[in-house]
Image (spheres, coloured by chain):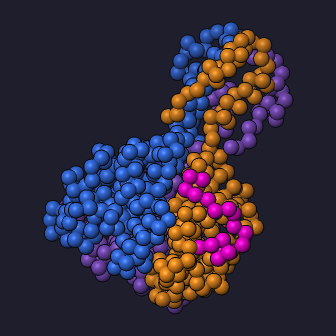
Chain colours: A blue, B orange, C purple
Amino acid sequence: MAEVTNPAATNPAATNGLVSGMSRGELEELVGKMIAERDDRDPNMITLVAFSGDLDRIWPTTILATTGAAGGMDVAVFFTFWGLFSLVKEEKRLTGDNWMTKGLSLMNRGSAEHAGLSKLNMGGAGAMMMRRLAKEHGVAAPEELMEMAKDLDVKLWPCQMTMDLMGLKREDMIDGLDEPAGAATALARMQKSAVSLFI
Amino acid sequence: MAEVTNPAATNPAATNGLVSGMSRGELEELVGKMIAERDDRDPNMITLVAFSGDLDRIWPTTILATTGAAGGMDVAVFFTFWGLFSLVKEEKRLTGDNWMTKGLSLMNRGSAEHAGLSKLNMGGAGAMMMRRLAKEHGVAAPEELMEMAKDLDVKLWPCQMTMDLMGLKREDMIDGLDEPAGAATALARMQKSAVSLFI
Amino acid sequence: MAEVTNPAATNPAATNGLVSGMSRGELEELVGKMIAERDDRDPNMITLVAFSGDLDRIWPTTILATTGAAGGMDVAVFFTFWGLFSLVKEEKRLTGDNWMTKGLSLMNRGSAEHAGLSKLNMGGAGAMMMRRLAKEHGVAAPEELMEMAKDLDVKLWPCQMTMDLMGLKREDMIDGLDEPAGAATALARMQKSAVSLFI
């Protein structure tokens, strides 16, 4: 448990005088402030780590993000490792700054629109079928949900370190993203979030 | 941090009178209520998202769920995407309502009892060996843990959207499940939960 | 929401006397204690479940653990299932206590240093390339981050049940680990943690 900090200890003036002169309203204000100061958990804050670039995981990420934001929550998605590739522009065929990262981009095509399933992908046929099933049931595709997320002010953070590693530049990725962030920033936000998921 | 709401502001009557007439018991009751009203996190609530249908992930899901419930916690498991298949009845060979979902059920056999490992499955030999190792060490199988979870009042929520998408009907799935739920319901519960994991 | 417990109810003596004699300092101390007693969430506590033994997942686990600990947070990592293999000593080629667990250790070589990627591993070439990219960009390897984690007092908990199941002994694993723990211990810690992730 975190330490109990007694505000009176850091504010000697507050120890002067008795409580008797306080109105009930003043008391409630004081207590309300003490509770808020101690509790840094925001019941409306969600942070999702989009680690995977697979279609079947980008889907829950974008569904949870848009559902939360539509319900008035403050949502941020931190895209890292394979997940970063789901932010690459659809028309971008080749990314990377050396033979390794260029090769990687050819083998692991970017954009949520080209994402495959983590299992039963069958060379893309599985992903295509899943998209068709979604369409028949009125479920939006991940790339549509991503646009919806932007409209709902969901923060979309690309991981700076992964960008460097994978040779992905800001212009390789879709518009409307927030500034690249690092693990420390993501972690600091998760500390305050009511819900943090690694997807 | 969430905004500090001053209850006195919304309840002008409370500002009348001084605190001096209050007994210490009344003060503690008032403060206790204010803390509880602001803090909607329930230290006893756990919500697990069972996304994966792989044996090696259903295992931790059902172990955490039963361990938590046995310790008096209020546990809910939200089964979505591949995870939903682990709720299909063991004897059910074919599910789905069109050629795609029927084909999917043939390639991705339902029921926790038929689940494979995410790696080294070797056509089911890996899963069989893992089950044998578990038995030798007195570790219950996921389908047994699922029954135990029901006995311990763990809430088992199938994801409505995935059911529609995959053509899975209520009667395809094991008995004792709770009403199907959506992402908004799962998210609302996670907001209040002390522990939320995406497995 | 958890039940509101009125401390006055369990401490009849506290109901004696009026608040009027209390100084403001005493009031703040009382309220501070009540808030701390009710809130068992520690904003500085992180618990990570390292379920996967894949290089691309051990990396975020060890990066988050060391980033958190370097920032003064209290971090614990619970290694379970495949994740446990990342704790095996690099030079250990064979582990296990029967033909199944011995076979498993041959097919799923232990140590973070030998971990493969969850996708595009290409017989180890993918992992090797990823390590080279990391080195070029000054990103430490997981086994280096693991050492750093120990120096930063990150708790490294091997899962007792998985150790039994996989036939892994304490001497098969790297030095500096904490005592093996079970699901109940991990869960109890997650209840108090501000951030809990299943990786």
Q: Position of residue C2 (x, y in %)?
A: 70, 43
Residue at coordinates 40% horizontally, 49% vertically from top-left?
A: A149
Q: Is residue B45 visible?
A: yes
Q: Quadrant of residue B62?
A: bottom right
* Any part of residue C101 in sight: no
Please give left or right for residue A137 compared with residue C161 in the image. left
Relative to A138, C144 lies left or right:
left
Q: Is residue A164 above or below residue C143?
A: above
Q: Dividing the picture into quarters, in which one does residue C181 lie?
A: bottom right
B39, A141: nearer the viewer: A141
* Residue nearer the viewer, C101 or A131: A131
Q: Position of residue C143 (x, y in %)?
A: 35, 65
Q: Residue furthest left?
A: A98
Residue C65 versus residue A57 in the image, above or below: above
Q: Give the camera-side residue of A180 and A64.
A: A64
Q: Which residues are magenta?
A: B168-185
**Residue A188 appears at what percent x and percent y?**
42, 44
User: In the image, is B2 to the left or to the right of A58?
Assistant: right
Residue A31 location (% of width, % of height): 63, 24
**Which residue is rendered at x = 59% and y = 63% of the image?**
B160
Q: Residue at x 69, y 67 (%)?
A: B177
Quadrant containing the N terminus of chain A is top right
- Inspect the magenta stretch and tell me whether residue B174 lies in it: yes
Residue at screen point 79% across, 25% down = B25
